[in-house]
Image: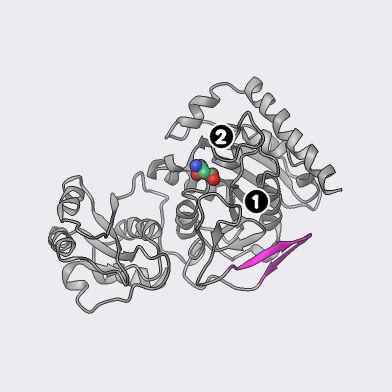
Amino acid sequence: MKKMTMIPLLAGFILGSTLWSGGFTNTTAAATSTTAPASVSTTADKSEKPQTNHLPNIKILATGGTIAGSSAANTDTTGYKAGALGVETLIKAVPEMKNIANVSGEQFANIDSTNMNNDILLKLAKRTNELLARDDVDGVVITHGTDTLEETAYFLDLVVKSDKPVVVVGSMRPATAISADGPFNLYNAVKVAGASSSKGQGVLVLLNDRIGSPRYISKTNTTTVDTFKSVEQGYLGAVVGDQVYYYNKAVRKHTTASVFDISNLTQLPQVDILYEYQNNGRYLYDAAVAAGAKGIVVAGAGNGNLSTASLEGAEAAGKKGVIVARSTRVGSGVVSPSTKDAASNFVSADSLNPQKARILLMLALTQTHDVKQIQSFFNEY
Ligand code: ASP
């Protein structure tokens, strides 16, 4: 019985892939592009007539990734092309979504998430806010590559101005693979976005039946489908069968409680990440400052520790007004604040990993350069 249900899904993707190649041009260009197309909506505004049924109206914003990945071989789980299929193909492959929501899609970008950049991120957040402000949208699902999914999701968690659900979803196996995880992840994401219990929970990350907060969840394995883990703080909930279950709340500030407002921003300040390792020198700090960094996140050793050479570079950066956030390379735990931090223009990144500390530091720097205020952001968000 299980095999019987898998075949139509797979066939849907393969058929969809054909439709996509025939119906839309420039797929390859979109897949490798690092900028969001100016106008990419597929079903966008025409499908959003007021619905007369009682199902939630869920908008799917597609950005690419493995969930839209395609390969000639259905056993291929590594050498495929991410961001190859269009949003309509993804939607057609899961017709069961029609039973739980009025779903419409918008092709926002079609990239490997390693090519997500500040420009696309800002546009994505603005588009998400625009959609959430509409009465005919009850929730937004964003399909995204898993490599940098946690960064986009955390950014959205800090700048979305609505308590309507936003669910960021990806997959580890391309759409063309045997036992692809994308279709069920997408179905579950739509289910979570349409659940009244998801309101006010902040932006959510959905993979492998687990619901996580972007503040806590991270990719932890290069290839397995259970890669997204919330090691220290735990998941918020799960989807089991037909039900959405919540057990925890994200207590750090997010969405409507967040002070960060991107509505008038056209760019974000440059924040770079440097990694602590044996025998390192200060030259990478000098290079980051020379390249215009306004902030530096250090993936420090242990409890956010820096070698003597790094410390020299970081202190020199601090003297030039650059904020240095001490995170850690160890993968979990809080970097405890030091009373010496503020004097050097340093902050502790709390339990944020370096890539998420970068997101918060960029937003913090849009508000202030005061090191104490920036530390308080790291304590609260
Ligand atoms: N490289 C892919 C991406 O991040 C990986 C994935 O989606 O799983 O776009």
* Residue 41: assigned label: none
Name the kind of residue labelled 2 in the image. Tyr
Circle 1 sits on which residue?
A: 135
Residue 378 among those drawn in magenta: no
Label pair 1/2, CB-CB below 8 angstroms: no
Please tell me whether residue 228 is drawn above or below residue 22 in the rendered image. Answer: below
Q: Is residue 228 visible?
A: yes
Q: Is residue 38 visible?
A: no
Q: Which residue is painted at 59% across and 67% down in the image?
A: 235
Task: Return the x and y of residue 165 as percentages of the image width and height.
Answer: 61, 58
Highlighted magenta segment, given as a residue range: 235-246
Q: Nearer the viewer, residue 153 or 260?
A: 153
Name the kind of residue labelled 1 in the image. Asp
Specify whether tag 2 is near ligand 1 (CB below 8 Å): no
Q: For the residue carrying disc 1, how many other residues have a C-alpha within 10 Å: few (<14), some (14-19), or many (20+)?
A: few
Please tell me whether residue 189 is drawn above or below residue 212 in the rendered image. Answer: above
**Camera-nearest label, 1 or 2:** 2
Task: Return the x and y of residue 194 as percentages of the image width and height.
Answer: 70, 56
- Cα distance between the residues tagged 1 and 2: 39 Å
SS of the residue at dot 2? loop
Q: Which residue ends up furthest to the right in the rendered image? A: 1
Q: Quadrant of the C terminus?
A: bottom left
Task: Return the x and y of residue 22 as percentages of the image width and height.
Answer: 65, 20
Residue 238 among those drawn in magenta: yes
Colour setting: one colour
Q: Main secondary structure of the magenta part?
A: strand
Please tell me whether residue 98 is drawn above or below residue 349 in the rendered image. Answer: above
Circle 2 sits on which residue?
A: 80
Which image quarter: residue 205?
A: bottom right
Q: Which residue ends up furthest to the bottom in the rendered image? A: 339
Task: Return the x and y of residue 342 as percentages of the image width and height.
Answer: 21, 72
**Image side of residue 323 versus residue 264, left or right:** left
